[in-house]
Structures are given as C-alpha cells and as structure tokens.
Amino acid sequence: MNSRPEPASGSPWTVPVGSGGRLVVPAEARALLGIKPGDQVRMRFDGGNLVITTPAATLGWLRQVASGLGAMVTDPAAELSAQRRRDARRELEDG
C-alpha cells in the first residue's frame, strides 16, 4: 500500500507502519519541515498523539519561552537590597 501526501490544506497524512514499526514521513512533510536524509527528529506523546518535532522547531520554541522569561529573571542582590529598603521604610513609618 503506497501512502500519498494529502492536499496542502493542512489535512493529516495516512501512512502505513512498516516492518520493525517504521513510519515513512511523506515527502511533502519532509520538505515543509526541512528534513533531509540523516537528520534526527524528536518524537513525543501529546494527549495520545505522536508528535514529531525537528531540532530547529524545538530551538525556536525554547527561544520563544526564554524571551518571555526575560522580565522574570532578576538580580538576587538587587532584589535583596530592594527588600531591605522596603523593610527600613516600614520601620521608619511605624517607628
């Protein structure tokens, strides 16, 4: 049974499971993902689905997550100084 790519409308592909559990990634999907022979991909389960991710996509996701953390990363020494100033201000106001 030959698998053939679905239309580029975002429809999923149906592929047979070969000997040894091998799956063939359709040529259209390989082209869209930039996968070449010898490349490695990551596979994981997500809600009962098998998700295949390229290293480039994983790196892009990590960069996006890290960029959102920029505001959350603080200097511990500066944070301690700020806390001490707040505490000193409160003592003066209560004192």
Image (tube, rainbow, N blue to C red):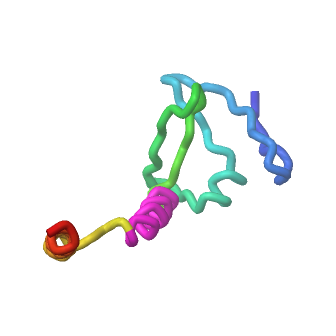
| Of residues 4 and 13, the one drawn nearer to the viewer in this rendering | 13
Q: Start and end of the magenta stretch?
A: 57-71
Magenta highlight: main SS = helix
| Of residues 87 and 92, the one drawn nearer to the viewer in this rendering | 92
Where's the N terminus, which quadrant?
Answer: top right
Residue 70 percent across, percent down from the top left: 38, 71
Quarter holding residue 77: bottom left
Residue 24 percent across, percent down from the top left: 61, 38
Give above or below for 10 relative to 84. Answer: above
The residue at the point 72 percent across, 53 percent down is 28
Left or right for 59, reference 8: left
Task: Give the farthest residue toward the front.
Answer: 95
The residue at the point 22 percent across, 72 percent down is 93
| Of residues 3 and 89, the one drawn nearer to the viewer in this rendering | 89
| Of residues 87 and 42, the one drawn nearer to the viewer in this rendering | 87
Give above or below for 14 relative to 77. Answer: above
The residue at the point 14 percent across, 69 percent down is 95
- In the image, is residue 67 part of the stretch drawn in magenta? yes
Q: How many dots with numbers?
A: 0
The residue at the point 54 percent across, 43 percent down is 52
Residue 78 percent across, percent down from the top left: 19, 76
- In the image, is residue 81 part of the stretch drawn in magenta? no
Left or right for 51, reference 68: right
Residue 79 percent across, percent down from the top left: 21, 70
